[in-house]
Image (spheres, rainbow, N blue to C red):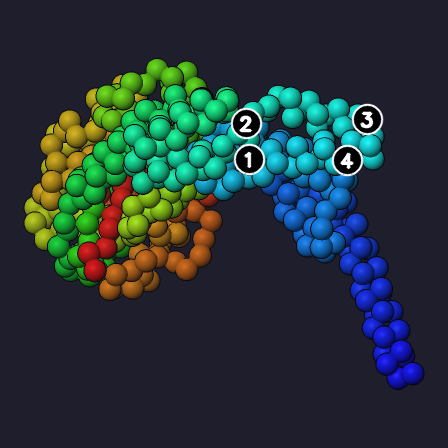
Amino acid sequence: MKNSILTAIFTLLTFCICQSQEALAKIEFAAAEEDYQAGNYAKSLEHIETVKEMLGSTNSTVMYLEIVAQQKYFLTTIKEPVNLNYYISKKRNLEMINYYVENFADDVPSEKLKEIYDLQKRYQGHSIEFDNIIEAYKLILEQEFKQAKILYQKSCDAGNPFACKLEENVDNNKKAKELQDEVLNGIKNNMIPVEGGRFTMGGKIGLYKKEFQPLPTREVTVDDFLMSKYEVSMLQYFTIVREKPKGLTQKFYDSLTKDLASQYPIFQLTVSEIFNFIEELNKKTGLQYRLPTEAEWEYAAKGGAQSEGYKYSGSNRLKEVAKYLNNSGGYIKDFGSKIPNELGIYDMSGNAMEMCSDYYELGYHSQMATNNPTGPSSGTAHVIRGGHVTSENTDCLIINRNGVEDNGKHYSNLGIRLVLDTK
């Protein structure tokens, strides 16, 4: 009798839990449908995974939404670099399409069945020897391009048209990898050692456009670091991020050759695009590139421990070291064509203005730390230093500072200069 009561209680509790899970699953599924209709396919798929976990299985309704959401997701991300999960998900979606047609044909509305059946016909043969495609992708990551091509060929010969297209792209993948390696090595090999030291930050020459006062001086110490000899090039940016800045016109982008892109600094950037570039660069290199602090930037621009005390970076004659308003025609120019500063670093007084990691705050110099200062703890704008191609002489002074808001705006002459810690 006691066992019967316990069994009944357990059954009742299980029923209540199941009912509760089903109710929550309905809420989650409604969210999946809402995200799908809004075009948020990745989010919709996340909700669907939660639904399946709650139900402990799937059904025709859930599977239908998963198939179409996954298909839409593939189509919207087709131009993006794919990874292993992409191929695994594609294989799984092909398997779901086949399963849906074979098992739910008699139970689902005809319009839904037709939609999935049309997908099945469109991708007929794509699932043939798909494991070879996954293995080939792994081989490409390991730069085993010849072996990858053999596996693609095997799937292609077996009747998989998807594999045939991928086989044609192996050589392009190889070239892309070679270009990426060339770019990454170029960035690393052009980092200049900057010996740390103590210097006078700020100065009394020139007035600020925003602050309308001489910059107060302060004795500051910075540690050793590495700084890029040149501003980040267009080729480096495009290769790392794999897309143009949204502020750069498609016409200009299409007109660029590899040689031109390797000679000109990237510009027309937002603050977030700069940080995204550095994040992607660090993922690909395993290093920790970053923006210079304002103190590091000024120290390097002044020539570091080898400083000759110039008011522009490398000379007291601006035209010797910078592309600016009087000699640029107002357009970004190829970098490295003027003389470098005392450290061998180019274009710190002109061409593209350069963003620092510090937040911008009016008059902050008078209160900054004296040892490796990093600026205010918060803010809405970042410090920019160095002149640019539409700058007048005063704007190109080493001590000149300004700020750019992190508001999604594309700044026409904003570029990137990188640093690395030596420790």
- In the rendered image, which residue does mark 1 sit on? 90
Residue extending farthest to the right is: 1
Q: Kindly check if marks 1 and 2 are in contact, taking CB atoms under 8 A apart as contact.
A: yes
Circle 1 sits in a helix, a strand or a loop, which is it? helix
> Which numbered disc flags the more N-terminal residue, 3 or 4?
4
- In the rendered image, which residue does mark 2 sit on? 126
User: Residue 349 at what x, y percent from top left?
Assistant: 22, 36
Q: Which mark is residue 177?
A: none
**Residue 22 vertical placement versus 122 (above, below):** below
User: Residue 109 at what x, y percent from top left?
Assistant: 83, 30
Circle 2 sits in a helix, a strand or a loop, which is it? loop
The amino acid beneath tag 2 is His
Closer-to-camera residue (290/392): 290
Q: Quadrant of the C terminus?
A: bottom left
Closer-to-camera residue (384/271): 271
User: Residue 327 at what x, y percent from top left?
Assistant: 21, 22
> Which numbered disc flags the more N-terminal residue, 1 or 2?
1
> Which numbered disc flags the more N-terminal residue, 3 or 1?
1
- In the rendered image, which residue does mark 3 sit on? 110
The amino acid beneath tag 4 is Phe
What distance separates the C-alpha of mark 3 from that of mark 1? 24 Å
> Which numbered disc flags the more N-terminal residue, 1 or 4?
1
Q: Is residue 111 visible?
A: yes
